Amino acid sequence: MRPFWETKTLAEMTTVEWESLCDGCGLCCLIRFEDEESGEVFATRAHCKLFDSDLCRCSDYANRKQYVPDCIKLTPDNIEALEWMPKSCAYRRLHEGRPLAAWHPLVSGDPESVHTAGVSVRGQTFSELELDQPEDAVDHEAPEFDADRG
């Protein structure tokens, strides 16, 4: 029997299935800025104040909008508009008709595989709370974490 991500569209998935697509890379929790001239969105090494950098997960996912009102809730309806989502993101890959990467925990069976493959931000970021001013994050542009691996 084929896995759900190969037989269902994103919109057909249950909440549990949808949430299981998150590979735990932490890339969507990086503070981003948009270049006013080019419109390009770039990530910084600063992560959201709720991001647990050891676990590579939100520390209060269920209540995150209460503490971070501009946190984006990813849905099947808005994935296309979020062009800044990394190419490696499972939601983006499936939306674009690509398979999950071999390192994705649903494929590998190992929640550490995303980190082992070098596709996560684990150990490479710092909290936005360490900045004097939020805009200081632009001085800490992130390297290309989101190589389209696997």
Image (cartoon, helix red, strand yellow):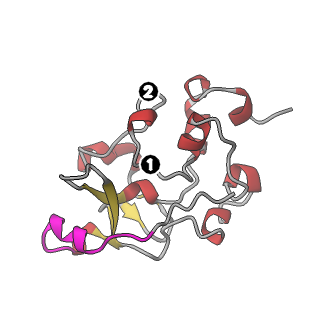
Is residue 49 toward the left or the right of residue 88 in the image?
A: left
Is residue 87 toward the left or the right of residue 113 in the image?
A: left
| Residue 65 placement: quadrant | top left
Query: Three-letter amino acid code at disc 2?
Result: Asp
Q: Residue at x 67, y 54 (%)?
A: 104
Percent across and percent down for residue 22 are 55, 48
Cα separation between marks 1 and 2: 14 Å
Is residue 33 positioned above or below 4 on the image?
A: below
Q: Quadrant of the C terminus?
A: bottom right
| Residue 18 placement: quadrant | top right
| Residue 1 placement: quadrant | top right
* Residue range (magenta): 131-143
Asked if residue 132 lies in the magenta stretch, the reply is yes
Label for residue 76? none
Q: Residue at x 23, y 68 (%)?
A: 138
Asked if residue 67 lies in the magenta stretch, the reply is no
Label 2 CA crowd tier, 10 Å (few <14, some 14–19, many 20+): few
Label 1 CA crowd tier, 10 Å (few <14, some 14–19, many 20+): some
Outermost residue toward the top?
Answer: 12
Query: Three-letter amino acid code at disc 1?
Result: Met
Outermost residue toward the front?
Answer: 38
Label for residue 77? 2
Q: Earlier in the sequence, mark 1 or mark 2?
A: 2
Q: Circle 1 is placed at which residue position?
A: 85
Q: Do tag 1 and tag 2 residues touch (Cβ < 8 Å)? A: no
Is residue 62 toward the left or the right of residue 67 in the image?
A: right
